[in-house]
Amino acid sequence: MKICVLPGDGIGPEITAEALRVLQALALPCELNEALLGGCAVDATGDPYPPETQRLAQEADAVLLGAVGGPQWDGLPRAQRPEQGLLAIRKQLGLFANLRPAILYSELANASTLKSEVVAGLDILIVRELTGDIYFGQPRGIELRDVDGRQERFAFNTMHYCESEIRRILRVAFEAARRRSGRLCSVDKMNVLETTQLWREVAIETAADYPDVELSHMLVDNAAMQLVRNPKQFDVIVTGNMFGDILSDQAAMLTGSIGMLPSASLDADGKGLYEPCHGSAPDIAGQGVANPLATILSVAMMLRYTFAQQDAALRIERAVKSVLAKGYRTADIYEPGMQQLGTRAMGDAVLAALQVD
Ligand code: NAD
C-alpha cells in the first residue's frame, strides 16, 4: 500500500497527523511518502503542484490530502493559487469520479439546521464528475469585445461533455447504487442545456446494463429543492462537475457538520485521492481545535475503495461512531452536556476505540 500524503495548508497538517496515527494503528503494511501541495508548495517552490509531488503522487496507489488554500495566497495570479494544485493533481491522475457520502450520525441529529425528523438517519452518496464540464472547457477567458458598438469586458466559459466521459461516471454511480439500495437519481438540466440532454440519453442507455438498479432523472433546480424538502428520498445521486460541486456542498450542510464528511476521487482503476470535504479552515488553523474525523473517515474510504480492505474500513467507521456515542465532540460539533476535545485528543479517542474493537 503505497500512499502519498499531502497535508497541505491551514488545519491540513493537524488533521492529517491524526488520520495517519489511525492508519498506522491498524498495522497494515504501508509505505507513506509526504510531499507539498497548495500554498506550502507555492511558498517553497513557487509551484502549487511541484514536480517532486507529481512524481510521488503518480507512483502511489492512493493519495491522502488534508486541505489547501488560505488568505495569504489569495492575491497571487490564478496559475499560482493553491487551488490550482488541487485541480492539477485531479487532472493529472485522471480522477474523474468524486464520491461524497453525506451521512448524519444519529448522535449528531441536532447539528443540522433542518428538523431532525427530516434528516435523522440520512445516508446519501453524491457521485460527481470531476474532470470535465464548464470548469475545464475551452475556450475560456475575459477580454475586451465590441458589444453593441462599444468596448466592454466580456467573459466566457464553455460547457461540454463527450459521451465516453458521461458513460464512465455513470458506470461508477450504477456500481455504487448496486452496492447500496439499488436506486440512482441522475441530475441534469436537459430542458435547457444540450450537454445535459446528452447526459440523460447516455444515462438511459447505460441503465440497460444495470437492470437491477432503478434509474430516475431530476432537473438540477428541483434536486436542490428536494434535497432540503425530503433528502431521505435519495440514495445515490450522479451529476456533472458544476451541478455536483453545488449539490454536494448542499448535501454536506444537511448534516450540519462539515468536519465529519470524507470524500474520494477515483480513476478508472481504483487509484484514488482521499480528502475531507472541508477546506483549510484558516480561522482555526494552528489552534489544535479542528475536527479530524472527516480525514480519519477519508482513510476508511481509502481502505475500502483503493485497497479493498473492507474490514479495516469498517473498524475505523465503528470507532468514529463509538467516540460520538461516548459524547466526545470537537468544538464544531459540540453540544452542551458533551465532552469537548481538541484535535489530538479526538485522535486519541479514536485510537482507544480501535483498541477495544
Ligand atoms: P472551510 O471549509 O475551510 O471553512 C468553513 C468553516 O468551517 C470555517 O469556519 C472553518 O473553521 C470550519 N471548518 C472547516 N473544517 C473544519 C474542521 N475540520 N473542524 C472544525 N471546523 C472546520 O471553507 P472556507 O473558509 O470557505 O475556505 C478556506 C480555505 O480553504 C480557502 O482558501 C479555500 O479555497 C480552501 N478550500 C480548500 C478545499 C480543499 O482543499 N479541498 C476545499 C474548500 C476550500
Image (cartoon, rainbow, N blue to C red):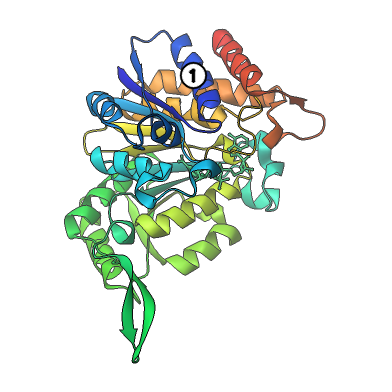
Name the quadrant containing residue 143. bottom left
Within 10 angstroms of label 1, few (less than 14), some, or many (20 or more) residues?
Answer: some
Q: Is residue 317 shown to the viewer in this render?
A: no
Amino acid type, label 1: Arg
Q: Considering the numbered disc 1 on the image, is that residue within a helix, a strand or a loop? A: helix
Q: The N terminus is located in which quarter?
A: top left
- What percent of the width, then of the height, locates residue 264? 39, 37
Q: Is residue 79 shown to the viewer in this render?
A: yes
CB of mark 1 near ligand 1 (< 8 Å): no
- What percent of the width, then of the height, locates residue 343? 63, 23
Q: Residue at x 41, y 45 (%)?
A: 81
| As drawn, 31 above or below 284 | above
Q: Residue at x 39, y 42 (%)?
A: 99
Is 112 on the left or on the right of 275, as rendered?
Answer: right
Q: How many marks?
A: 1
Q: Nearer the viewer, residue 97 or 148?
A: 148
Q: Nearer the viewer, residue 206 or 57?
A: 57
- What percent of the width, then of the height, locates residue 194? 27, 72
Q: Nearer the viewer, residue 242 or 53?
A: 53
| As drawn, 150 above or below 211 | below
Q: Nearer the viewer, residue 6 or 148?
A: 148
Is 279 on the left or on the right of 51, as rendered?
Answer: right
| As drawn, 50 above or below 144 | above
Q: Residue at x 41, y 19 (%)?
A: 311
Name the quadrant containing residue 204. bottom left
Name the quadrant containing residue 290. top right
Is 238 on the left or on the right of 116, as rendered?
Answer: left
Q: Dividing the image into four equal quarters, which quarter contains ligand 1?
A: top right
Label 1, on which residue? 315
